[in-house]
Image (tube, rainbow, N blue to C red):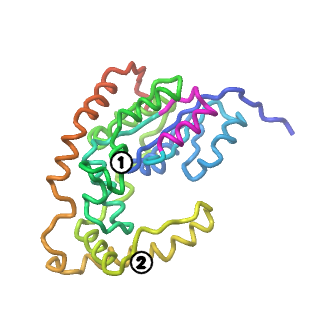
């Protein structure tokens, strides 16, 4: 048998999320269709270091979404591949934290929004440091020798092909537009359904479950909770709105406060994006 030649130093491209910034859409609907690069999906992230070190491909694309564990995981990966090319997607702070709250509420978090994130006392489920987006850019710049590619979620919504072009060009990949669907992979549940889920969980005192990190055991642990979640969420379509009261899921004033407090951080992120030298070329087929 002929030995497969080993590449001593393959190029590594590292997509680091964040969560709720189209990560799953990219991981399932875009990255698998990139050519001229070997994609390691998020389910195989645990073995990405060893796979890359085998050097069977000239370039690799690794994708994993990080939120609270962002710095820890980035530094861990950078110890192995300091010359990797990082990719970070951002979404305006208030929009991002609202989407995170809806996700957690759907999964079992029944406390109000100001208990999820607390800009005044910083005693919420999510700490205010999670909204320090520019700090994440600085971490990537510190850990890797290559300037990170930072893209904005809104651009994917407004100009998806230009967005995908930029990412593909950064990875020196090509793709066929016919392989990629622009429809959203997951449709968000209606606010009424999420409020019903919160009401039921509050009455039954059911919290978001904690799972083991062992993949097989985690799969079986999730089954009863998924059945319960879908049962409650879809039954919420039949519940009279009068049962839920008139309070919105997220008070608009609280989101405005988040946007006000993070406006300077967002401006710094936009400035970085607009002034980063970028050898981007269109690569769609």
Identify which residue is drawn at 51% across, 70% down.
222
Which quadrant is the C terminus positioned in? top left
Structural distance between the alpha carbons of marks 1 and 2? 30 Å
Tag 1 residue: 182
Image quadrant in which you'd find residue 40 = top right
Note whether 155 is above or below 65 in the view shown. Answer: above
Query: Which of the numbered marks, if any, corresponds to residue 172?
Result: none
Query: Which of the numbered marks, if any, corresponds to residue 228?
Result: 2
Towards the viewer: 51 or 138: 138
Q: Position of residue 247 (x, y in %)?
A: 15, 67
Q: Position of residue 234 (x, y in %)?
A: 32, 75
Note whether 245 is above or below 278 in the view shown. Answer: below
Would residue 188 appear left or right of 55 to someone viewing this image? left
Q: Secondary structure at mark 2?
A: helix
Disc 1 or 2, which lies upstream in sequence? Answer: 1
Q: Position of residue 99 (x, y in %)?
A: 30, 54
Q: Secondary structure at mark 1?
A: loop
Would residue 205 appear left or right of 120 to someone viewing this image? right
Identify which residue is drawn at 30% across, 65% down.
189
* Residue 244 shown in magenta: no
Towards the viewer: 282 or 218: 218
**Magenta stretch bounds:** 70-86
Which quadrant is the N terminus positioned in? top right
The residue furthest front is 121
Q: Are marks 1 and 2 in contact (CB under 8 Å)?
A: no
Towards the viewer: 244 or 131: 131
> For the stretch drawn in magenta, what is the main secondary structure?
helix
Identify which residue is drawn at 61% across, 33% down.
79
Identify which residue is drawn at 48% across, 40% down.
71
Structural crowding at the residue carrying mark 1, measured as other residues with C-alpha within 10 Å and reported as few (<14), some (14–19) or many (≥20): some
* Residue 76 shown in magenta: yes
């Amino acid at each position: 048998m002929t030995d497969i030649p080993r590449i001593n130093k393959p190029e590594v491209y590292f997509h680091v999320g964040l969560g709720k910034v189209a990560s799953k859409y990219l991981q399932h609907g875009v990255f698998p269709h990139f050519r001229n690069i070997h994609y390691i999906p998020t389910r195989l992230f645990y073995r990405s270091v060893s796979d890359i070190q085998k050097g069977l491909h000239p370039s690799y694309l690794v994708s994993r979404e990080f939120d609270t564990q962002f710095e820890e995981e980035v530094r861990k990966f950078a110890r192995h591949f300091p010359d990797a090319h990082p990719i970070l997607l951002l979404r305006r702070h208030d929009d991002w934290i609202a989407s995170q709250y809806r996700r957690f509420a759907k999964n079992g978090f029944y406390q109000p929004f100001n208990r999820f994130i607390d800009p005044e006392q910083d005693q919420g489920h999510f700490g205010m440091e999670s909204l320090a987006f520019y700090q994440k850019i600085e971490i990537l710049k510190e850990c890797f020798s290559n300037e990170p590619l930072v893209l904005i979620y809104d651009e994917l919504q407004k100009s998806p092909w230009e967005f995908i072009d930029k990412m593909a060009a950064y990875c020196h990949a090509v793709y066929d537009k016919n392989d990629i669907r622009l429809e959203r992979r997951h449709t968000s549940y209606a606010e009424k359904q999420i409020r019903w889920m919160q009401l039921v969980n509050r009455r039954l005192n059911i919290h978001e479950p904690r799972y083991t990190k062992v993949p097989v055991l985690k799969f079986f642990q999730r089954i009863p909770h998924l059945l319960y979640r879908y049962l409650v969420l879809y039954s919420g379509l039949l519940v009279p709105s009068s049962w839920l009261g008139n309070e919105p899921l997220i008070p608009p004033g609280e989101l405005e406060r988040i946007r006000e407090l993070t406006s300077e951080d967002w401006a710094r992120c936009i400035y970085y994006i607009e002034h980063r030298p970028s050898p981007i070329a269109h690569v769609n087929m």
